[in-house]
């Protein structure tokens, strides 16, 4: 299943480049090697590029395809809805149905507001937090990603660590995106959070975090860290916001908050919610969400659009029904994959770690063990990981250069075996 030629993707990129900056519509897509790929279709665990190469897919549309590509239940629900209407500019029954499902599944959810993208839902959650507390500031963590909208890009993945609480742009030219209302804290450092809140707590509306720092290296919180953050927020009257755009529905039906037992005041959900149809949600305690009734503006032409909502309902139906089988199977396959990668790395003498969180694997090259902090992740080397990922693509596995792999319910034991055979070849190529 080697990818033989990428000339069609290269030709496409050249054409697109004449009219689209870098030829891509989301900047991370420009960095895939050997070349940014153009695709013609995807089904289950497989994706096919314009040159006819078929890959086992671990990019999964950057995370949403938890059920794999084209899950039949979702396709059927969308097809049925398409025949009757797409966008009403008014309500339809499937919206309340979806909110009821989210309330059932996500431990801290009592009220739900829909948006379209994760970035927007983060903005809505922070606006709710500011309105509910009457405060302006937000604490975020080094290396955590909360979408691309100002000013939440400050100190995202790729930023230096340990630069203190003043926000810094990830891309130098974006200096206008950071503002005094953002305070930055190192991850897994309870004293740092306690100190920051002791100094600024009275002005802080929200402490927002990825409860597993997926974008900052797939780092679990240390034992007791989330509970400490919860307690500190209560002490200082700030709201705890979990950005579960990636972890929601993926780590467990109720996301990281179900896995860790720590519940936030507000939760942001997206990605796996819609199986690829654009939809996001802010869910929260009724008392906090009440401010959304009159106090804040919340709008969006496409919020609650019928296709995305029925896709989400069908997705959550499958996930709810599969609580006892689908998640254990995802855990088993992800474990086989991560353990297999580390076993092969040891055999090749390659300093490769595969960190797991639910159906997610993040590879680190030459990084310390155990990896706890964002600063630890920056010790790792990215160039060999990029080379390795390129060889994975050449060997028929669609995998991001960051080493973040999404496993889906459509992956099979056979896919994992093929993937590990490709890992073996890629490690041979990288080591030679
Ligand atoms: N929050 C997290 C944790 C994410 O990983 C992402 C996207 O990758 C976002 C927010 C932004 O979501 P979207 O790309 O849908 O705007």
Image (cartoon, grey):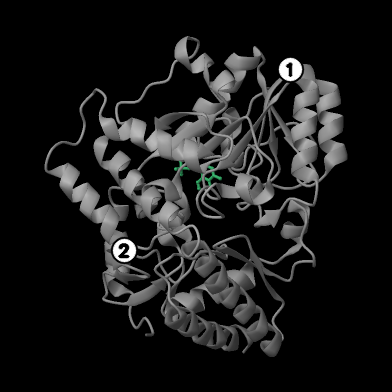
SS of the residue under disc 1: helix
In-image side of 42 versus 158 (left or right): left
Q: Quadrant of the N terminus?
A: bottom left
Bin the neighbour count of mark 2 within 10 Å (Cα to Cα): few under 14, some 14-19, many 20 and up: some
Q: Image point 42% across, 61% down: which residue?
A: 60
Q: Image point 82% across, 29% down: which residue?
A: 196
In-image side of 283 versus 280 (left or right): right
Task: Please tell me whether residue 344 is drawn above or below residue 292 in the rendered image.
Answer: below
Q: Earlier in the sequence, mark 1 or mark 2?
A: 2
Residue located beneath label 1 in the image: 203
Q: Image point 61% across, 40% down: which residue?
A: 172
Q: Is mark 1 within 8 Å of ligand 1?
A: no
Q: Is residue 121 visible?
A: yes
Task: Please tell me whether residue 265 is drawn above or below residue 381 in the rendered image.
Answer: above
> 33 and 319: which one is in front?
319
The image shows residue 152 at horizontal and vertical percentages of: 58, 34
The image shows residue 359 at horizontal and vertical percentages of: 54, 62
| Outermost residue, left side | 83
Disc number placed over residue 286 in the picture, else none: none
SS of the residue under disc 2: loop
Task: Please tell me whether residue 299 is drawn above or below residue 150 in the rendered image.
Answer: above
In-image side of 271 versus 75 (left or right): right
> 323 and 428: which one is in front?
323
Asked where in the image residue 409 lies, by quadrant, the reply is bottom left
**Mark in the foreground, 1 or 2:** 1
> 385 and 277: which one is in front?
277
The image shows residue 317 at horizontal and vertical percentages of: 37, 50
Q: Is residue 303 visible?
A: no
Residue located beneath label 2 in the image: 38
């Amino acid at each position: 299943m080697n990818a033989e030629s990428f000339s069609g993707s290269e030709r496409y990129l050249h054409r697109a480049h004449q009219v689209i900056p870098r030829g891509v519509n989301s900047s991370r897509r420009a960095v895939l090697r050997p070349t940014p790929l153009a695709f013609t279709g995807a089904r289950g665990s497989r994706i096919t590029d314009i040159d006819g190469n078929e890959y086992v897919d671990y990019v999964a549309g950057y995370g949403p395809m938890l059920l794999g590509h084209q899950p039949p239940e979702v396709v059927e629900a969308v097809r049925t809805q398409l025949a009757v209407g797409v966008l009403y500019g008014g309500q339809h029954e499937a919206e309340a149905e979806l909110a009821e499902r989210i309330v059932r599944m996500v431990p801290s959810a009592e009220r739900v507001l829909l948006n379209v993208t994760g970035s927007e839902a983060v903005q809505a959650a922070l606006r709710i937090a500011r309105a509910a507390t009457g405060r302006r500031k937000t604490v975020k963590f080094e290396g955590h990603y909360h979408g691309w909208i100002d000013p939440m890009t400050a100190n995202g993945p790729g930023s230096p660590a340990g630069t203190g609480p003043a926000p810094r742009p990830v891309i130098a030219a974006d200096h206008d995106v950071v503002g005094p209302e953002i305070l930055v804290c190192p991850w897994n450092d309870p004293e740092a959070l306690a100190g920051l809140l002791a100094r600024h707590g009275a002005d802080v509306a929200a402490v927002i975090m990825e409860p597993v720092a997926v974008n900052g290296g797939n780092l679990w919180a240390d034992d007791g860290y989330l509970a400490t953050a919860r307690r500190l927020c209560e002490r200082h009257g700030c709201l705890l916001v979990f950005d579960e755009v990636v972890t929601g529905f993926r780590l467990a039906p109720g996301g990281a908050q179900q896995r860790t037992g720590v519940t936030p005041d507000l939760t942001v959900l997206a990605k796996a919610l819609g199986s690829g149809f654009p939809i996001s949600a802010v869910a929260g305690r009724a008392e906090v969400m009440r401010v959304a009734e009159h106090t804040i503006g919340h709008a969006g032409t496409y919020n609650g659009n019928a296709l995305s909502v029925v896709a989400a309902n069908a997705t959550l139906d499958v996930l709810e029904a599969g609580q006892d089988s689908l998640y254990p199977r995802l855990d088993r396959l992800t474990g086989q994959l991560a353990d297999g990668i580390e076993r092969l790395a040891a055999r090749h003498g390659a300093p490769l770690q595969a960190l797991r969180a639910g159906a997610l694997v993040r590879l680190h090259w030459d990084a310390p063990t155990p990896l706890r902090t964002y600063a630890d992740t920056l010790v790792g080397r990215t160039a060999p990981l990029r080379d390795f990922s390129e060889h994975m693509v050449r060997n028929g596995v669609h995998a991001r250069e960051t080493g973040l792999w999404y496993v889906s319910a459509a992956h099979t034991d056979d896919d994992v075996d093929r993937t590990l055979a490709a890992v073996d070849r890629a490690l041979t190529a990288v080591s030679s």
